[in-house]
Image: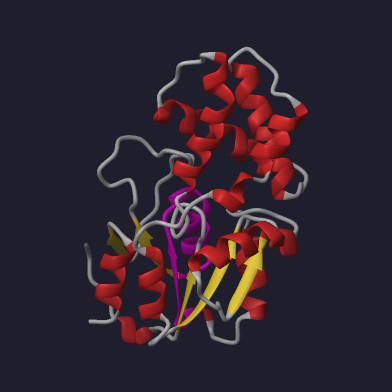
């Protein structure tokens, strides 16, 4: 872990999926429900990396609701594996976000951090799907910015620009907290933000469900509990 002067910040903005919600566990479980009945064998990391490429491609094109991104990503992954998912499987996978669990430390860490900072979310998701995840997190965020509201997906800087317009705190007083270097740290640093990397995959190889990228966060912590301990020290 590295150190950062937290007195510089009045607000923390978070990525949700991969940082607060364990989307890799959720994605793998939803994929296994489709692959296992077909006796398709693939490792978790292989599935996540295949999925990451499909989702990044879907999000980089003309804007689609996140449910549609999920469906298109599933279709591409399944095509690579040699079959076409049923319409019911696409529907269930596209709604599986509501079932993705929070990391064990997210709820308590957010509750602790809210005693010192105002909290926001900048998330690549639809309003209704994030609302379901927010209920699992149990925190009333001061600001919620979704891809649906912006009409684009991170790493597009438009998502951060939209957040700057909504958040009544100067960007220099905001610390952006995220797991994905690709979706969050690269664009946030390009915009001059300070960032904290929650390196959820510190003990795993590869980049998992996010495309590989290079960035220089201002702070690195292996978990939300470790981050909260630093922020509130």
Which sits in the foreground, 24 or 12? 24
Say if the magenta span includes residue 146: no
Q: Position of residue 108 (x, y in %)?
A: 36, 71
Residue furthest to the front: 37
> From the viewer's perspective, is 74 left or right of 101?
right
Say if the magenta span includes residue 190: yes
Which sits in the foreground, 119 or 34? 34
> Can residue 70 be seen in this snapshot?
no
Instruction: Assign the N terminus to one quadrant of the image.
Output: bottom left
Instruction: Assign the C terminus to one quadrant of the image.
Output: bottom left
Which residue corresponds to the image point at 60% horizontal and 81% vertical from the top-left? 167
Residue 62's quadrant in the figure?
top right
Position of residue 233 relative to residue 92, above or below, is below
> From the viewer's perspective, is 206 left or right of 174?
left
Q: Position of residue 40 (x, y in %)?
A: 51, 15
- Count of marks, rendered view: 0
> Can residue 63 be seen in this snapshot?
yes
Position of residue 99 relative to residue 161, above or below, is above
Which residue corresponds to the image point at 53% horizontal and 84% vertical from the top-left? 170
Which residue corresponds to the image point at 60% horizontal and 77% vertical from the top-left? 143
Q: Position of residue 151 (x, y in %)?
A: 75, 58
Q: Position of residue 32 (x, y in %)?
A: 51, 28
Position of residue 69 relative to residue 75, above or below, is below
Which residue corresponds to the image point at 34% horizontal and 64% vertical from the top-left? 224
Position of residue 42 relative to residue 114, above or below, is above
Report the span colored magenta: 172-193
What is the image's colouring? secondary structure
């Amino acid at each position: 872990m590295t150190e950062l002067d937290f007195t510089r910040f009045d607000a923390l903005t978070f990525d949700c999926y991969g940082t607060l919600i364990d989307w890799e566990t959720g994605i793998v479980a939803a994929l296994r429900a489709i692959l296992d009945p077909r006796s398709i064998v693939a490792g978790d990391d292989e599935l996540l990396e295949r999925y990451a490429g499909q989702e990044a491609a879907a999000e980089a094109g003309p804007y689609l609701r996140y449910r549609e991104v999920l469906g298109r990503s599933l279709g591409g992954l399944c095509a690579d594996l040699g079959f076409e998912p049923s319409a019911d499987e696409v529907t269930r996978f596209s709604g599986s976000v509501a079932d993705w669990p929070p990391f064990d430390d997210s709820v308590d860490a957010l509750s602790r951090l809210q005693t010192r900072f105002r909290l926001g979310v900048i998330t690549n998701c639809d309003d209704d799907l994030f609302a379901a995840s927010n209920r699992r997190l149990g925190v009333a965020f001061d600001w919620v910015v979704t891809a649906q509201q912006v009409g684009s997906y991170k790493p597009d800087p438009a998502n951060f620009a939209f957040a700057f317009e909504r958040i009544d705190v100067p960007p220099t007083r905001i610390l952006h907290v995220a797991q994905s270097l690709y979706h969050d740290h690269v664009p946030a640093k390009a915009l001059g933000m300070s960032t904290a990397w929650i390196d959820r995959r510190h003990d795993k190889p590869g980049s998992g469900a996010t495309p590989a990228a290079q960035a220089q966060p201002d702070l690195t912590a292996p978990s939300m509990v470790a981050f909260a301990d630093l922020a509130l020290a």
